[in-house]
Image: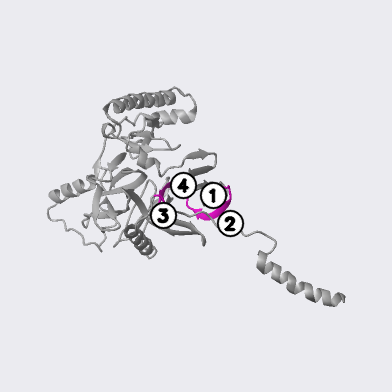
Amino acid sequence: MMSEAKHLARPLALVALILFGGCSPRTPAPPFAEFVIAAGDSAFWVRSDGGGVRMRGAPIVLSRLDGRFQELYVEDDDRSFEDAFFVGQTLYQRDLVTGDSIEVFRDSVVASMAGKYARKHPDARRLATDEDTEEDPASSASAELSVLAVHGPYLSLEYHVDTGGATDDTWHMTRHEVVDLRSGRRVGLAELLGKGMATTVLGRARRLYRETVDSVLKDERAPARRAAQAIKRFKFDPTSFALAAPSGALMIAFSAPGRGNGGEGFVLPIRPIAVSEPAWWAEAREALPTSITDGEERWVRPRYTVRAVYDTIVRPVRLVLEDSSGRVYAIGGVTAPVHRIYWLDNPDFDSTQRRALIKAFDEAALYDDATRTASSTGTPVVFAMNRTRVTGHGSRITFP
């Protein structure tokens, strides 16, 4: 009898398992969400639905204007001769739907130097793209562009020029610029903030610069003494600044360019200045975190929250999705830092833009490694273009 009871209990238990789904409740599906994350040197497309959370990455730098995605990329402008190396750079943005590109920023210094060299040496032979200059050229100049930040329609970039060669005419230059992505024009404070606010900010920046210099000059410690010798080489420039949002609020970050031996090629950063947010900032603010705490950033949406968790031990930033009930779903790891998030689910992403973004991610997956990069003290930044693949790092970028 005991044996028969055991055999009878097994099918009954199986029926209960089928009818009631077992003893443990089913894990709820994650909330619907879709967005593109700009992080480190890549973009990451995240989609969450009843099938789970999926993420796809691509080595591509994106901006978004009026709901349309743009790809940022850099091209070399090689004007070298047999005994002179001249390579400038131009930054473009390409509309993913139309494929049309517009010039955002063009180096003019290297082009001007190449022109002067050609006029001075009328018999010099211009090199083809597959030819190299001599090992120790008499003259050389190269430009490097890097993206510092993208806030709505405005791009903050760093522009660096190095010159050198067999002659003693060697110098370096670094400055920061803000460019309107809609027109490719460099913009000043008055256009960004209004004339009254711009005047106030400039006055504050000059005072901060003087305070920075004075504090270094008054410091008697040995490291400060060495810094005092270099700080004399810097000069405040009201046109050298970038936009920043370290806590999600708009700030202006001035940087005094260095001049002469010991300062040239560097910038002296000045403490960022908080400003009243102009009307255009509302669009840029949508992509930034709604709250920042020690080691974590949060983007709070109506149906869910995206969390970026920074860990000093684990290099990738851990991304998680949290629903309105507090349930957490892992997304994956991305390169630090997370710059901004472009939302695709509110309003809904139209089919034309979706197809264009899919194509851009597919093309980026085929990018080869035929690139060279320069050392950097900044965040890795990858630029991608249709015909020539280029990668770069932070505040110093060189391309093939």
What amino acid is at disc 4? Pro
Q: N-terminal of the two: label 2 or label 4?
A: 2
Residue assigned mark 4: 337
Q: N-terminal of the two: label 2 or label 1?
A: 2
Residue 28, numbered circle: 2
Q: N-terminal of the two: label 1 or label 3?
A: 3
Q: Residues within 10 Å of mark 2 (few under 14, many from 20)?
A: few
Q: Residue at horizontal 28%, vertical 55%?
A: 95
Which residues, given as a range, are shown in magenta?
323-346
Q: Dot 1 lies on which element?
A: strand
Residue assigned mark 3: 43
Between circles 2 and 3, the one closer to the viewer is 2
Q: CA distance from mark 2 to mark 3?
A: 28 Å
Contact flag, marks 1 and 3 (Cβ < 8 Å): no
Contact flag, marks 2 and 1 (Cβ < 8 Å): yes
What amino acid is at disc 2? Pro
What amino acid is at disc 1? Asp
Q: Residues within 10 Å of mark 3 (few under 14, many from 20)?
A: many
Residue closest to the eye, 188 or 158? 188
Residue 186: x percent and y percent?
Answer: 25, 40
Residue 74: x percent and y percent?
Answer: 30, 53
Between circles 4 and 3, the one closer to the viewer is 3
Q: CA distance from mark 4 to mark 3?
A: 12 Å
Q: Is residue 326 magenta?
A: yes
Between circles 1 and 3, the one closer to the viewer is 1
293 shown above or below 200: below
The N terminus - image quarter: bottom right
The C terminus - image quarter: bottom left
Q: Report which quarter residue 183 is drawn in.
A: top left
Q: N-terminal of the two: label 4 or label 3?
A: 3
